[in-house]
Image (cartoon, rainbow, N blue to C red):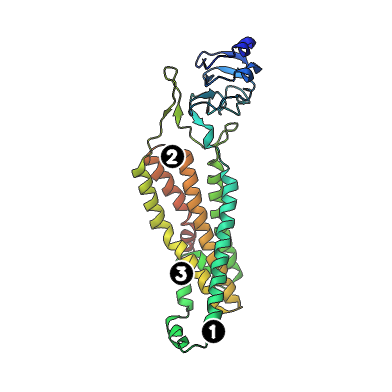
């Protein structure tokens, strides 16, 4: 690309894609204030595309080889590009970039805050019911059933190693924590793989193709509303029970007062709800990153939901 290109001040469209051009990108692009379309993909260019004055007209306005894998160690740097392509001629929009790891931390802190709020609400409600001396207190008391140990074990799951959190046995606690840690690590792996980083190779599947005979890029994803409906149904069927039981345990913890049993029930509920929330989050972000058909969407969801069954599988193994 000649360095004098920056002198074409009235240039509005520059299409140089798929010409196998080599060399560095000239800094003169900065002067092209009227440029509304720039296609540089499908070449072997290096360097940085200067910040452009225009923002383009759509997601296919500014395209360059700024994706991975690249023909070079470092892809083209194009901060203003609306679309980045790799050497396989697969492309995706820069708008898709979001920090899934950072968002995951925020989500989990939000979940923890929500559970603490539930526990505090339950504690305050119990205290109010205890101090209430109105004539209707007896009636309210009949409506408030005390949670039995059997109910608590049913909530956390009698066929899950998470019931070991209600045990006083040290080894049982180690097993429960080990499974919780293993599930958390697996979900973190999926979350990390789901991030889109054009400068590094991740599991993210680019979903656009920008052909030479078309000004606009084509979306190759076949995922539709029906696929996402099946996805939601799978999550509801598989995760609702664990999330509900986790909330039930957190709510029931206050009924045991300031005792070891209360803390065991509380932590059991927090762990159960949190790992289920992490499974939900990782299922959503990973499928957004890699699923490009309904079959892939369902297949990936089933694999992720299998991780949530590790506690039950270990429990079954211990009873063989």
- CA–CA distance in space, label 2 to label 1: 53 Å
Pick the quarter of the image with the C terminus. bottom left
Residue labelled with disc 1: 130
> Gap between marks 1 and 3, in whole Å?
25 Å
Task: Count residues near mark 3 (Cα–Cα under 10 Å), then give few for <14, some for 14-19, many for 20+.
Answer: many
Of marks 3 and 2, which one's residue comes earlier in the chain? 3
Say which element carries label 2.
loop
Task: In this rendered view, identify the residue nearer to me: 151 or 244.
Answer: 244
Under circle 1, the secondary element is helix
Q: Locate residue 87, reporting x and y percent.
A: 53, 23
Q: Is residue 43 above or below residue 114?
A: above
At x 45%, y 75%, the residue is: 151
Q: Is residue 113 left or right of residue 306?
A: right
Q: Position of residue 141 (x, y in %)?
A: 46, 84
Residue beneath disc 2: 291
Q: Earlier in the sequence, mark 2 or mark 1?
A: 1
Label 3 to label 2: alpha-carbon separation: 34 Å
Mark 1 and 3 residues: CB-CB less than 8 Å, in contact? no
Q: Which residue is mark 3?
A: 155
Above or below, 203 relative to 183: above
The residue located at (58%, 46%) in the rendering is 101
Point out residue 162 in the picture as x, y percentages from the top left corner.
52, 65
**Residue drawn 49% across and 39% down?**
289
């Amino acid at each position: 690309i000649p360095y004098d290109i920056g002198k074409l001040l009235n240039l509005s469209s520059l299409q140089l894609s798929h010409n196998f051009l080599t060399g560095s990108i000239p800094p003169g692009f900065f002067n092209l204030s009227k440029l509304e379309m720039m296609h540089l993909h499908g070449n072997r260019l290096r360097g940085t595309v200067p910040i452009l004055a225009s923002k383009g007209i759509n997601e296919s306005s500014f395209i360059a080889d700024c994706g991975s894998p690249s023909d070079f160690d470092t892809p083209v740097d194009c901060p203003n590009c609306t679309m980045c392509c790799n050497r396989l001629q697969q492309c995706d929009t820069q708008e898709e970039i979001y920090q899934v790891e950072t968002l995951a931390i925020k989500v989990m802190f939000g979940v923890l805050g929500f559970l603490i709020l539930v526990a505090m609400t339950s504690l305050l409600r119990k205290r109010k019911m205890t101090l209430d001396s109105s004539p209707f207190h007896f009636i309210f008391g009949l409506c408030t059933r005390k949670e039995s140990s059997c109910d608590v074990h049913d909530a956390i799951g009698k066929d899950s190693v998470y019931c070991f959190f209600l045990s006083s046995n040290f080894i049982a606690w180690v097993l429960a924590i080990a499974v919780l840690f293993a599930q958390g690590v697996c979900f973190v792996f999926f979350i990390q793989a789901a991030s889109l980083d054009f400068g590094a190779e991740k599991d993210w599947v680019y979903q656009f193709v920008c052909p030479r005979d078309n000004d606009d890029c084509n979306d190759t994803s076949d995922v539709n509303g029906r696929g996402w409906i099946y996805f939601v149904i799978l999550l509801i069927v598989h995760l609702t029970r664990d999330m509900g039981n986790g909330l039930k345990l957190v709510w029931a913890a206050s009924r045991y007062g300031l005792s070891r049993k209360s803390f065991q029930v509380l932590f059991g509920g927090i762990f159960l709800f949190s790992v289920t929330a992490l499974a939900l989050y990782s299922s959503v972000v990973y499928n957004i990153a890699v699923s490009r058909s309904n079959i892939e969407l369902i297949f990936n969801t089933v694999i992720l939901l299998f991780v949530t069954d590790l506690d039950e599988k270990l429990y079954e193994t211990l009873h063989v």
